[in-house]
Image: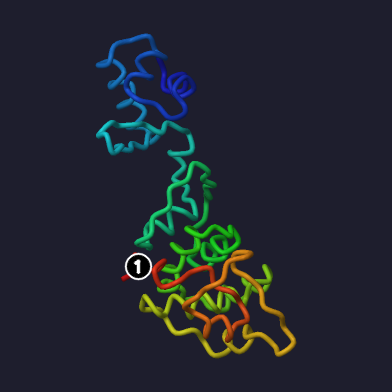
Amino acid sequence: MNIKDLLKKLEGIQTINTVASILNTGKDKAIYHIHRLREQGYVKTKRLSSNKRVYNISFENRLGGKSYYDIINKISPVKISTSRVYKIYGKDITAEETLIYAIKTQSLRIILASLALFKKIDNWPLLYSLAKSNHIERQVGALYDLARKVIKTRKMPKRFRNNSLPKPEYQYAYVIPGLKSKDFNAIEDTWKIYIPFNKKDLEDYA
């Protein structure tokens, strides 16, 4: 069977047993076919807690694309596992873009994990432009001040801070609707942004 037909038959999440069943062959032959696909870059292998291997077989694996979650998991001590992965091809994903994406998810764990991205931010004009276009400058500022409490970060430029701080007439807003902090009220008051984390939530950064 040629590689193209093999990929078409096996694309998806597989085990040795499912490959053997789909191809109506023995386990040794199934291992051989997985090896053929892996050599072409179509296979990513993951070992489960039970020590069982599963194989993600996809044409996209060969393209070498990355997701925002790949960037976060590479940098952050807080890991993200999700079945919904949007891959980006043909360009490098920046820490600035990834941070904005994470905040917009309004996911508690994704935003918590993304705090680590602040130590990789070096293009502050880009971050400000992205934050402003998404109307989350204050959220970025508040999360930056929070991140500074648990990790070493590059210093936020005065221009970014001054342009992002709330005006007197601004109302309080949320990072995640309905969630407030009991421990970081000073940051909340500075940015007029309610933070969804308390000290205990940051223990993975200790």
User: Percent position (x, y) of residue 82?
Assistant: 47, 45
Q: Secondary structure at mark 1?
A: helix
User: Percent position (x, y) of residue 20?
Assistant: 35, 15
Above or below, comparing residue 183 to residue 96 in the picture: below
Q: Residue furthest right?
A: 169
Quick check: 192 left or right of 143? Answer: right
Which residue does the image show at 37% across and 62% down from the upper left? Answer: 75
Quick check: 172 left or right of 53? Answer: right
User: Percent position (x, y) of residue 27?
Assistant: 27, 16
Which residue does the image show at 37% across and 34% down from the upper left? Answer: 43
Front residue of 16/129: it is 16
Which residue does the image show at 71% across and 90% down from the upper left? Answer: 168
Amino acid of disc 1:
Glu
Above or below, comparing residue 173 to residue 6 in the picture: below
User: Percent position (x, y) of residue 17?
Assistant: 33, 19
Residue behind mark 1: 203
Front residue of 77/133: it is 77
Above or below, comparing residue 22 to residue 102 in the picture: above
Q: Quadrant of residue 15?
A: top left
Which residue does the image show at 36% across and 75% down from the upper left? Answer: 151
